[in-house]
Image: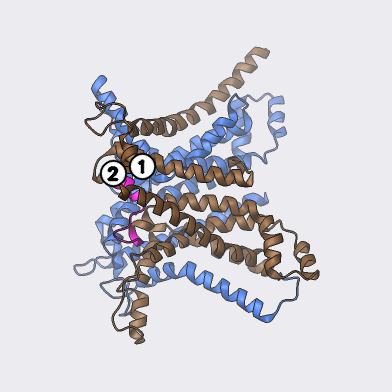
Amino acid sequence: MMNSKITKIRWGFFLFFMPVFLWLFLLFVLPHLELLRLSFLGTGYYGKSGFTLGNYAAFFKEPAYWLTFVRTAGYSIIITLIVLIIALPMAFYITKVVGFKARGLLMLLVIVPFWVSVLIRVYGWMIILRESGIINQILVGMGLLKTPIEMLYNDVSLIIGLVHTNLLFMLVPIIGVMDSLDNSLIEAASNLGAKKLAIWWKIIIPHCITGIMSGSIIVFMLVTGSYITPALMGGKNSLWFTQQIYNQFIIAFNWNQGAAFGFLLLLISSIIVGLSLKITGQKLGEVVK
Amino acid sequence: MIRTLPNTKAYTIGFSAFAVFYFIFLFAPLVIVCILAFNDSMFPSLPWYGFTLDWFFSKGPKKVGVFHDPMNLKAIFTSIRVALGVSLLSTVVGTCAAFLFDQEEFRFKKFFYLLMIAPMVVPGVILGISILSFANTLGMFLEHNIGIDLRILSPGLLLVMFGQSTFITTFVALVVIARLKKFDRSLEEAAYNLGANRFQVIWFITLRYLKPSIIGGAVVAFLLSFENFNTTLFLIGSKPTLPIALFAQIRDGGSPVVNAVSFLLIMGMSIFALANLYFSHKAEKQ
């Protein structure tokens, strides 16, 4: 009697376990192992040239490769900081400054644009910024400019696009923790004569640090891994690292080199995420939630 | 500083102005894309030549609206097909994952949980190239050694479906797990005591309770699939999905038809998002 019940429960377990196992191993673990294997294979005929570190060596030897990498990482950090600087006061405005009724509406207004595809939002920025775009037409029409200037395809437009597409992923985690900040702490500090800047540094930011960290990690990952925005809004001569991967895979058809680039991208993301988790003493599982 | 403290006028006005600029920044590109879908001009830009619905309904020959543009229409239907497939696959597997991690105990559970989260964290581009490489190697292996040629393994819509499901399943699983955590397990025990077996309990009790979150997860999966670009880019064959088709048009400068498609998408997404918000709100109240 007891035995049969146990086997029944185990059957239930396998019913749930098998699809999940197939999903994770066939679509995630094995593909990544295959990618790792490819990245260590020579670029000659398929599978014939054996183990080599050449693909990784090529990355360090060719400045065009590692400069793109450094540029991507550097700009991702700058963009994450800009997003943080914009999201902090906005989160504060929504949670602490406006009334409860306005709050629900503001939350809705903040979230809805992010349901719209990145592609469309980037297209909007292109229409606004390009040489025949809205801003140029307004400026020329007002007589402030004689001839239109190209405002798209440079690093500033790249930053505008990436900041716009990632704001929400910083805002939501910060709002989550700022909500739990007791207003009386701010009131007490203010009554005791603390300046606004001091309140921000000593009370608000320390309280929100977990939200700030998880927001920063998500934004950083999304920015380094983005493809659409750099491809459509960035300069023609300055690639994003994901574009290097695309070029190797689809244009040069050098999958081994592309695989090595893929792992380098994965490596830098993991290292930066791991470091920021270490610094704040959080766990991945908690941050993801 | 906060609403319970006395604030100077300049502070309040300054903060509100910041919020206004924030929303202008957020909405400007969307509003402009929508407005220019109705401009009677051959280019998606100002000046304003008057209101027209040509970019939706015109049959040509000069202007071809969305509803008569075979390329964009085909891409929309391809995307819907892919999104339905992904939605089905990831909802079934995601719900299994939710049961597995919430109700079962097994060795290496923590490890598997982290492994389940990982597809959501790995950049979409890398998911794309890894699945492309694996499918290609597997396909070559099967062809050389066994002599069968599996269509699934060459780039195309099926591979896109599997590729997208890789990370979308995680989203569904997390949505369902969140609701399963609030489930009162004494309901299951009561059913067991009344003589139900495990499958009856799951079917009649637990799944009934989970229905709102499973539907919510399926909707989220549909939307995520519909707008996915990074993973799809590497797995697509000859039939483009809508984001792939739009990307090519936008890279070449766009056209008012792209604005019209975008307008339809923005309207569709807003309705979806509002409905989703409404139902999740309702589900929380229950």
Look at the image and give the residue range highlighted in magenta: A232-248
**Labelled disc at residue B93:** none
Q: Amino acid at mark 1?
A: Phe
| Earlier residue among tags 1 and 2 | 2
Measured as percent of width and height from the top left, residue A66 is found at 36, 48
The number of numbered badges drawn on the structure is 2
Q: Amino acid at mark 2?
A: Gln
Q: Name the residue: 26% across, 39% down.
A: A254
Asked whether disc 1 touches disc 2, contact meaning CB atoms under 8 Å apart, the reply is yes
Quarter of the image where the C terminus of chain A is located: top right
Mark 1 sits on what residue? A261
Q: Specify the subunit that label 2 lies on.
A: A
**Label 1 to label 2: alpha-carbon separation:** 9 Å
The extreme bottom residue here reads: A143
Q: Name the residue: 71% across, 29% down.
A: B189
Does dot 1 land on a helix, a strand or a loop?
A: helix
**Displayed quadrant of residue B252:** bottom left
Q: Specify the subunit that label 1 lies on.
A: A
Mark 2 sits on what residue? A248
- Residue closest to the eye, A51 or B258: A51
Kindly tell me whether residue A156 is visible in this rendering: yes
Chain B hue?
Answer: blue
Q: Is residue A18 above or below residue B177?
A: above
Chain A hue?
Answer: brown
Q: Is residue B154 above or below residue B71?
A: above
Residue A234 part of the magenta segment: yes
